[in-house]
Amino acid sequence: MHKKNLLLAIITCLLFGGNAYAAEEDLVFFDLSLAGYSIGMTYDEATAVRPFHYVKNVSSPPAEEPYYIATVEHIYVDNVEMNLSVSFIDDKVKKIIGKFHPSALKDMTKRLQTALGPGENKSRVVAKKDGSENRQVIYRWDFPNAKLLLVGLSSNSDFALVSLVLKNKTKQMEQISRDDDPSDKTATFPSAPN
């Protein structure tokens, strides 16, 4: 009887121990990417996804890291035509911006919400001085090291944007400090890029 109970206990530990480890591994290795590009990729890794059409150096003060933008035009991601800009700082991807036609905004919103959850809806209507209104569709998803934004403006009939941006390390540390401080219950998120 004792041997049977001991054998059952060992089998139970092996079965449940393996499941806990697998779930933890899935959480740790979550890969966030936009059109195949991920934050932190090197230039060589990014060109392995697809070749760039243009690469432009951006002038910066001498104290900062080298900064350049690579562009891919007229690609299809999930049947949506996009132009992509991939920004590199210190030879690592720091920002990916996809421009697409506003008619695909509703479909893109649904796809991102299905993949990432509802996100934070920061949409709003802005009244202009002439009495007309502009609708701004803005959704935001926050992750530990990056944020993903989806933006569409009723005043812009040329394009809508989806962007994946590395969070500023200083702002990350401020957020962690606020999260760790039990007296501060008003934690805020870093502001969206302009």
Image: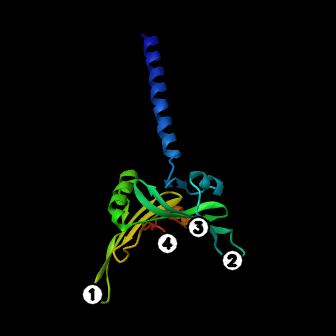
Left or right of 153? Residue 90 is right
Residue 59 on image: x %, y %? 66, 76
Q: Amino acid at mark 3?
A: Thr
Check disc 2: other Cα within 10 Å, few if <14, some if 14-19, many if 20+.
few
Q: Which mark is residue 131?
A: 1
Q: Which residue is mark 2?
A: 61
Reading the chain from its start, which is encountered first: label 4 or label 1? 1
Q: Given the current orientation, which residue lies at the most extreme top position?
A: 1
Mark 1, secondary structure of its residue? loop
Q: Amino acid at mark 4?
A: Pro
Q: Amino acid at mark 1?
A: Gly
Q: Residue at x 43, y 16 (%)?
A: 5
- Nearer the viewer's eye, disc 3 or disc 1? 1
Q: Which mark is residue 170?
A: 3
CB atoms of marks 1 and 2 within 8 Å: no
Q: Given the current orientation, which residue lies at the most extreme left position?
A: 131
Reading the chain from its start, which is encountered first: label 3 or label 1? 1
Q: Which residue is mark 4?
A: 193
